[in-house]
Amino acid sequence: MSAFSIPKAAAALLEARRFRSAIALPGSGPSSAAEAFAVQDAVAASLGPAGAWKVGTGGEAAPFTAAPIAAWLCRASPGVFGAGDFLRVGVEAEIAFRLGRDLGVDGHAPAEDEVRAAVVSLHAALEIVDSRFDTWPVPDPLWALADNQNNGGFVYTVPGVTWDGASLAEREATLVVNGDTVFSGLGRNPGGDPWALLQWLAGHAVARGGLRAGTLVTTGSLTGLVFVQPGAEVVAEIAGIGRVEVSLPA
């Protein structure tokens, strides 16, 4: 790609997914978060309906980041993904909200009390982090945002637990890879209280058909990003929320 084009960017990212081939970061990319989200929208039209969304905070160009996660990339714990399904495999332990009713599907941004009333449960989750680009970290945050904010897959606990409204910005957590503990302690969400992220997403998603009942919204790492090798067995536990597992056979 030379001059930036939303359709060409989406086509290149979809081709990289299809063939599991890394692409070089093009010289020109999205000039704004709006253009990056437009690429996401075009990719999502081919990947199919979202089963989950990820949301977090970004930098100056995109203070909030979000991306849909296609339903076929979402697995209940214990989940299994082939390591060969990805170019690289990073894992993050996260907290996810599940919605029990539609939000924003009528084209109107929901009020704060509507968003809170829609949350029916909390879930421990593992996000699989990947990228369609050949460099890591992706040096251009807007390209990372266009590439579904580096999402590869998503695993969550069933059932969830009832949320009592308490802050979720900090929570004791552990992350274990192949029996070795790689994180244990007080996990801190880099975006602060995930509740604020969910409120923002509810408005952002209106232009994309809203958020449907049953959708999960995962809210950023409590444990940091850990890259794992093919064959890894990963377990995360978040205090008061649950234990989530994923296997990544070679």
Image (spheres, grey):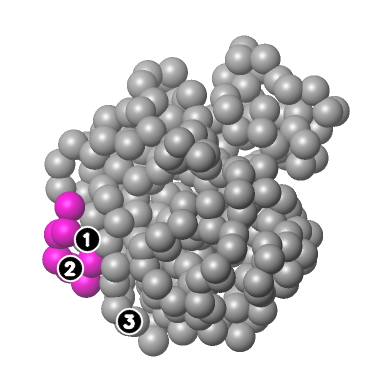
Q: Residues within 10 Å of mark 3 (few under 14, many from 20)?
A: some
Q: As displayed, is residue 226 above or below residue 141?
A: below
Q: Please name the residue that numbered disc 2 is placed on.
A: 179
Q: Residue at x 70, y 37 (%)?
A: 205
Q: Position of residue 35 (x, y in %)?
A: 67, 49
Question: Label 3 is placed on what type of residue?
Answer: Gly
Q: CA distance from mark 3 to mark 2?
A: 13 Å
Q: CA distance from mark 1 to mark 3?
A: 14 Å
Contact? badges 2 and 1 (CB < 8 Å)? yes
Nearest the viewer among 145 and 208 is 145
87 is within the stretch colored magenta:
no
- Residue 176 is tagged as 1
- Specify the segment rendered in magenta: 177-183
Q: Residue at x 61, y 44 (%)?
A: 32
Q: Which type of secondary structure does the marked residue at label 1 adopt? A: strand
Q: Position of residue 49 (x, y in %)?
A: 74, 55
